[in-house]
Amino acid sequence: MENLKSSPCDRRRFLKLGLAAAAGLALPVTTWARLPEFKLPERTLSLYNIHTGETLRKAVYWAEGVYVPETLAEINHLLRDHRSNKVKKIDPRLCDLLFALRRRLEEKDPVHIISGYRSPETNAQLRKASSGVAKHSLHMEGKAADISLPGRDLGILRKAALGLKVGGVGYYPKSGFVHVDTGKVRSW
């Protein structure tokens, strides 16, 4: 504590670092918690994997204040790496993000999953084929999905995702999908 008293610059630096750290810790909770969709008694998802043809319809993944493990396991399987058939635990906040998007857009049809989890090997293969694939992609952590809503303008889906102000949003109109993730708020 003695070092902090030694100069006004040290105290200012300490306060800036402390405030920045506090803001960084509080932001994710505040950002996610403020979404009105999360005040509902249950949350459901309808998903369709375009590569495997598997569908999950109106599956309750959150009820009575907790995530439903059986439904999360089904979601993990549906969002698996279809190239290697590897399954990874999907971040439940990604489910929340997809749920909030469907609610905002008043969507009745399933969200089409172009890509969910990607194994590191799959990500490396895709990276060799395209410059648009991140080396440390959040897909490898189960925190990202590339999605579309057939019959819905992709620009509207992008705008709705940006409006949530949670996670990252990438816009790929030529490829026909929007990337969403539970990382830092950013867009490209």
Image (cartoon, rainbow, N blue to C red):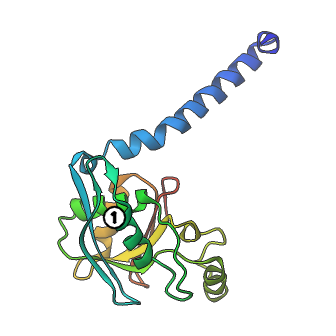
**Is residue 65 positioned above or below 178 on the image?**
above
| Residue depicted at 37% across the width and 62% down the height | 95
Q: Residue at the location (51% across, 67% down)?
A: 142
Compared with residue 130, is residue 4 higher up or lower down, i.e. above or below?
above
Give the percent coordinates (x, y) of residue 173.
40, 80
Residue 74's place in the image compared with 103, above or below, is below
Quadrant position of residue 83:
bottom right
**Residue at (21, 49) in percent of width and height:** 40
Residue 104 at x, y percent in the picture: 23, 59
Figure quadrant of residue 99: bottom left
Residue at coordinates 25% horizontally, 48% vertically from top-left? Answer: 64
Question: Can you give x and y, in whole percent of width and height, for residue 138 in the image?
Answer: 56, 66
Q: How many marks?
A: 1
Question: Which quadrant of the structure image shows residue 179?
Answer: bottom left
On the image, numbered disc 1 is attached to which residue?
Answer: 98
Residue 47 seen by the camera: yes
Which residue occupies the foreground of this view, 184 or 91?
91
Q: Is residue 20 left or right of residue 177?
A: right
Secondary structure under badge 1?
A: helix
